[in-house]
Image: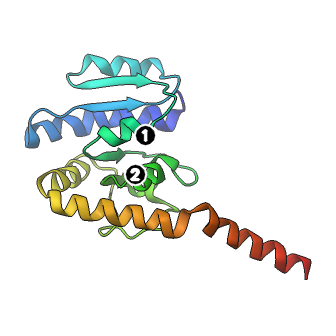
C-alpha cells in the first residue's frame, strides 16, 4: 500500500466516495488490506469506520468478510489481481474503468464498472447494497468467469498451444 496508484485509490475513496456512501447508506466500514501502508494511508484511520489492516498472510478472510469489494483504482497498469481475487471468491465488485482494463468479464453481468467519479462510484456501490439479489448474481457470475477464463489449466493450455505452434 505504498505504491502510488494504490495510495491514490484509497485516499480518493475515503475522501470523495465514502462521505457520499454514508449519506446514502449510513454507517459504512472500509478496510484497507495490503503490505507497507504509506503514511497517507495510515492517516485515513482518522476517518470513522476506516481500518488499515496492513500486510496479511492470507487476504482471503478479509475478502470473505466484505459485503462488497471495491477497486477504486484511477491509475492502472496491467490486470488488477485484486479484482480477480474478489471475483474468484464470488464477491460483488465495483471497479473503475481503469481497474477493469484487461479483465475478461462483462460489466453489468459479472461486476459493476463505473467511471472514477465520486457520485457514480458511490451510486454503483449503493445499487449493489440495496439490491442483494443483483449483488449475489454478479458475484456468482464473477466466480464462473474466473473458473472458465482464469483457471491455471485454461491459461496453460493457451501457452502450450503457442509453444507447440512455435516448435512446428
Question: Which residue of the protein is positioned furthest toward the right in this rendering?
Answer: 167
Q: Residue at the location (34% across, 50% down)?
A: 116
Q: Residue furthest bottom?
A: 168
Residue 86 in picture, x, y percent from top left: 40, 50
- In the picture of the structure, the residue carrying the numbered disc 1 is 60
Residue drawn at (83%, 80%), measured in percent from left and top? 165
Residue 43 place in picture, x, y as percent: 35, 17
Q: Quadrant of the C terminus?
A: bottom right
Residue 166 in the figure: left or right of residue 100: right
Q: Name the quadrant containing residue 152.
A: bottom right
Mark 2 and 1 residues: CB-CB less than 8 Å, in contact?
yes
Q: Is residue 162 above or below residue 56?
A: below
Q: Secondary structure under badge 1? A: helix
Question: What residue sits 33% from the left and 56% below the top?
Answer: 115
Query: Which residue does the numbered mark 2 point to in the structure image?
Result: 89
Please tell me how crowded label 1 is: few (under 14), some (14-19), or many (20+) other residues with Cα within 10 Å. Answer: few
**Residue 110, how many percent across, how many down?**
35, 65
Gap between marks 2 and 1 measured at Cα: 8 Å
Residue at image position (73%, 69%) is: 159
Q: Earlier in the sequence, mark 2 or mark 1?
A: 1
Amino acid at each position: 500500500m505504498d505504491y502510488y496508484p494504490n495510495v491514490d485509490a484509497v485516499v480518493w475513496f475515503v475522501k470523495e466516495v465514502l462521505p457520499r456512501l454514508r449519506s446514502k447508506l449510513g454507517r459504512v466500514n472500509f478496510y484497507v488490506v495490503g503490505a507497507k501502508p504509506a503514511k497517507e494511508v495510515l492517516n485515513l484511520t482518522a476517518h470513522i469506520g476506516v481500518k488499515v489492516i496492513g500486510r496479511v498472510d492470507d487476504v482471503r478472510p478479509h475478502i470473505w468478510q466484505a459485503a462488497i469489494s471495491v477497486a477504486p483504482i484511477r491509475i492502472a497498469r496491467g490486470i488488477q489481481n485484486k479484482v480477480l481475487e474478489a471475483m474468484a471468491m464470488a464477491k460483488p465488485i465495483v471497479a473503475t474503468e481503469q481497474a477493469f482494463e484487461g479483465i475478461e468479464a462483462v460489466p453489468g453481468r459479472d461486476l459493476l464498472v463505473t467511471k472514477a467519479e465520486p457520485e457514480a462510484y458511490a451510486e454503483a456501490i449503493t445499487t449493489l447494497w440495496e439490491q442483494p439479489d443483483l449483488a449475489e448474481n454478479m458475484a456468482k457470475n464473477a466466480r464462473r468467469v474466473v473458473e472458465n477464463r482464469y483457471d491455471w489449466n485454461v491459461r496453460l493450455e493457451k501457452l502450450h498451444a503457442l509453444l507447440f505452434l512455435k516448435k512446428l
